[in-house]
Amino acid sequence: MSEPSDIAARLDARLVSSSLLTGGVSAHVTHLVLARPDGTRLDVVLRQHDAGDMRREAAVQRWIRSHGACAPEPLLVDDDGTWMVLAYVPGRRADARDVDAMGHYLARLHALPMATAPALPSREAPDLRPWLPANHPLLSVPLPKPEGRGVLHGDFWPGNLRVHEDGICALDWEDAAVGDPLCDVAGARVELTWAFGEAAAEQFTRAYASLAGAVDATRLARWEAFTCAAGLAHVDQWGLPEADVQRMRERGTAILERVTRTLTGA
């Protein structure tokens, strides 16, 4: 683990304060307030975790920024990729007011030239077998054929988005990948349904399609089933209040029932 005082020294600044940012699961995130020699303030975020490689995360954020989309600016990256320092992104967490902006941001991300992107893992057709009972009717539905590929955020939900005067900024790119764009769309739909209800998910999808074009309902339903089933298998590990867990389980069950009807005609 890197010490905040060491980070301050590497940025030619003095540590004023540090505070743990809560809400994440995979990384230890600390907000540092630093003072430069000229007296100006510098706000940064220190991200640390034992798994994964933050060098790749930093590379994709630099690539995103080079194309004019909003992502945090990497300032320092550990040689081993176990931590990095980012410019702090001010603003509020995205909520139900922002679903149109969320859809537009994601459509623009998926339209970026994938050929110039840094090397990223691949995310292809969703495999439901680890997450559903062996007799579940969705397991008899053939896997959809991917149509088109793009750079994926990998965890696009309101908690990873900040809203500021220039619009939406996406944080936490550790799950970035290349693959079927509907993976991102489905993940956002499930999270929006859990948080705000199905109407918010439908509004988000319309906003996405207004820039990206028509969305294949069959592929989207399969990705929704995958995201929802996997999420429900882990929801107890996220440290959420019991009332939130119960709401997510109820709405998640409704999502799985809906996509089962869509995919099986039952």
Image (tube, rainbow, N blue to C red):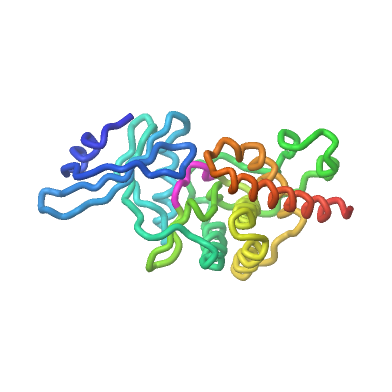
Q: Is residue 135 above or below residue 262?
A: above
In percent of width and height, residue 77 lies at 33, 38
Return the residue found at the far right: 266
Q: Is residue 147 above or below residue 200?
A: above
Q: Residue at x 75, y 35 (%)?
A: 129
Q: Quadrant of the N terminus?
A: top left
In the depicted view, which residue is nearer to us: 155 or 119? 155
Q: Is residue 159 visible?
A: yes
In percent of width and height, residue 266 lies at 89, 53
The span shown in magenta is 171-176
Q: Is residue 223 visible?
A: no
Return the residue found at the far left: 38
- Count every numbered label the image shows and give the total: 0
Residue 172 is one of the magenta-drawn residues: yes
In the depicted view, which residue is nearer to us: 188 or 107? 188
Residue 126 is one of the magenta-drawn residues: no
Q: Residue at x 23, y 51 (%)?
A: 42
In percent of width and height, residue 72 lies at 38, 52
Return the residue found at the far bottom: 210
Q: Is residue 260 left or right of residue 234?
A: right
In the depicted view, which residue is nearer to us: 198 or 54? 198
In percent of width and height, residue 184 lies at 60, 52
In the depicted view, which residue is nearer to us: 146 or 9? 9
Magenta residues, dominant SS class: loop
Q: Residue at x 38, y 41 (%)?
A: 29
